[in-house]
Amino acid sequence: MYVIRRVAKTERGQERVVAALLTKICEAYEQAGRSKAQVYIGGRGLPGAPGMVYAEWTQERIEPISPSKVPESVITDNAKLQALLTEYPIEFYELVTPEKLKEWGLA
């Protein structure tokens, strides 16, 4: 199992607009079968860097997405999102589970 995190870096004050677009994109992928994502913001009166919006979800496997499987609304909303971003990296993490610890001989 893997945790995938998309990091959307934007100008200060645009976090909520970016979060709304990222939420729509995640919902479209969820309707296409991907697991539920959480979208969250740092800053804006909370600890955390301003201008940062995150989307995070889990997947059983890491596989490329065929362009034919990208929902049409994602293409439209992603174009709007890209206009607001300064960076858009993606991070991949292996989720440590009791099964993985056993497999690694650490449980």
Image (cartoon, grey):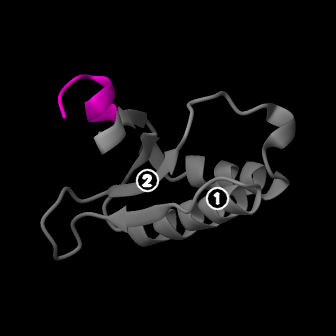
Q: Earlier in the sequence, mark 1 or mark 2?
A: 1
Q: Residue at x 36, y 34 (%)?
A: 94
Look at the image and give the residue range highlighted in magenta.
100-107
Residue 24 point in image, percent of width and height: 64, 66
Which quadrant holds the C terminus? Answer: top left
Outermost residue toward the right in this view: 68
Which residue does the numbered mark 1 point to in the structure image? 25
Pinpoint residue 87: horizontal percent, then vertical percent. 42, 39
Amino acid type assigned to the residue bearing label 2 in the image: Glu
Q: Quadrant of residue 31?
A: bottom right
Q: Is residue 28 left or right of residue 6?
A: right
Rendered location of residue 17, percent (x, y): 49, 69
Residue for point 65% across, 65% down: 27
Q: Residues within 10 Å of mark 2 (few under 14, many from 20)?
A: some
Look at the numbered disc 2 and give the secondary structure of its residue. Answer: strand
Q: Residue at x 29, y 43 (%)?
A: 98
Mark 2, residue position: 56
